[in-house]
Amino acid sequence: MKKLNFLYILFAAVAAFTLSSCKRELGALPTQARVEGAVVTDQKSAEVALNGAYARLANATAASTGWHYIFEIFPSQLSGLMQYAFGRTIENTNLMAPTGSASYWTPNFSILNAANAVIEEVSELDDSKFSGTRKAEILGEAHFIRAYAHFQLLWMFSEWFDINSDKGVLIRNEPLRLSNASKKRSTVKESYEHILADLDFAIANARTVRPNHYASKAAAKALKMRVLLLRGQGSDYNDVITIADDIIANTGGTSYALEPKLRDLFQSKGLSSSEVILGIYPQPSQDGKFRAYQFVQSGVYLTTNEFVQLLNGDPRSTWMYSRVGDVHNHATMAGLNKLDSFYLTKYYGPAVEVAYAIRLTEVYLMKAEAIIRSGGTVANARNVLRTVLERAEVTDFTAIDNATTPDQMLIEIYKEFSRNFVSENGMDYLALVRLPFNTVKQLRPTITERFQIILPIPATEFQMNPAIGEQNTGYSKT
């Protein structure tokens, strides 16, 4: 009965997601949300279903996209750059209990369910139901969305650092039904292969030119770079460099360019910036992200002293954070002695509600890291890193000039990931955990054992899906 109740709740929750939309955008919700059943009958209904999958990716409700909680704030809590305003929570300790990890597990399976439904139902339709190549494009976008969710599960809930581990991702490649709810997790090797296969499909079939709040070939290529950089097997690092050069050279006709001033991207241009490869379009009149970064109610998150120190001497210190007392002298905050803490002001301005899944800056930084990891020269990696720093209006390059060994340059690249991508899309945390583990422990003292760099599978999953297998090493099932 537990399994039946779980599935009933899941199906009911999805069926309740029936909000109207007049815009075809990433934040838009479908006119009809569903898990299974023949509701996709032509191109129009396929587009509606695809919009539903995008809405799940954005973690959207009728009022707001919730991307910032799962994909922005949470990873930066793990990396030590963000914290809850009223004290550091379990996310900041890097030792989460199985009873507390469901908040980061469940949304990804909601995304998978929607993407799988699109893939299944669109695949069954005759090509004549679609104009031109749109059927293949829709499938390409859905495969990208599925890859994105599986990759989130890979780095959060699998032993991705051990290619031979049997503790990989619980792969969901079809809509969830009673008949397939019980399933064993895949191996780490299988998990990487499944994600990369989806991305190769997206690269082959998604549109080349697409509004940047939809997945494109370039978005799939950039996400493939993330996956290969994390796996680090065989030719992976060289492949990362090749893909980066392809994106930077605008191969295929899609033009991306680094924003001349990084601040303009976040605080004024938003999705109009030519740097954005994939962005999250906000719901009309939403203010959820603004509330998360500026004290209005109790649900506010602040930067940590570690982040402030990271920006010491950096020109971004003038606009990426502000002392709480300098912005709002709230009595509540004063009572909690938080006036000497710091707001994250990175997103302040008219584009505050926009979120960024993939930017060209990340492509440059991943290339720089791959140059070092593939045995390339420190000088070549430094040149790529300097290009990024110049867009952040940095003029003092002493730190990167003094980085003369591969290990020193990897640290400088990690620092720039942290400065540039704090509370954005998890790249600050991934840059940290890709470093040698002894370095990780030095930079993040709350991490003392390797298992702490990932999360435990939620306790409820073992109750509802006993076939899943063993818990991640170092954690209990309860």
Image (cartoon, helix red, strand yellow):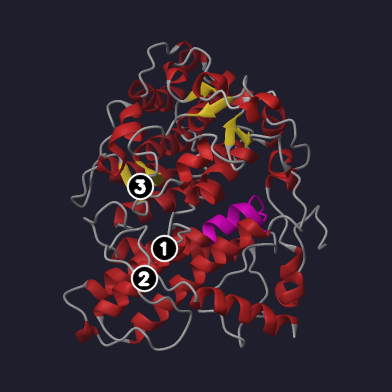
Query: What is the three-letter code of the residue carrying label 3?
Result: Ile
Quadrant for the N terminus in the image: bottom right
Residue that numbered label 1 is attached to: 55
Q: Is residue 48 above or below residue 217?
A: below
* Residue 176 visible in the snapshot: yes
Distance between mark 2 and mark 3 Cα atoms: 33 Å
Q: Write down the quadrant of residue 81 in the picture.
A: top right
Residue position for label 3: 243
Of tags 3 and 1, the one toward the viewer is 1
Q: Is residue 154 magenta?
A: yes
Q: Residue furthest front?
A: 331
What's drawn in magenta, residue-wise?
A: 150-164
Which badge, 3 or 1, comes first in the chain's sequence?
Answer: 1
Q: Secondary structure at mark 1?
A: helix
> Closer to us: mark 2 or mark 3?
2
Position of 137 relative to 8 (above/below): above
- Crowd tier of the residue under label 1, counting other residues whose Cα lies within 10 Å: few below 14, some 14–19, many 20 or above: many
Q: Position of residue 174 (x, y in %)?
A: 50, 78
Q: SS of the residue at dot 2?
A: loop
Question: Of the numbered discs in the image, which one, if any, rests on residue 30?
Answer: 2
Q: Are marks 1 and 2 in contact (CB under 8 Å)?
A: yes
Residue 161 locus on image (x, y percent): 64, 50
Q: What's the residue type where badge 2 is placed? A: Pro
Label 3 sits on a secondary structure element that is helix
Q: Answer with mark 1 or mark 2, whichever residue precedes in sequence.
A: 2
- Work out whether 399 lies above or below 103: above
* Residues at marks 3 and 1 touching, judged by CB atoms closer than 8 Å: no
Res. 232 in view: no
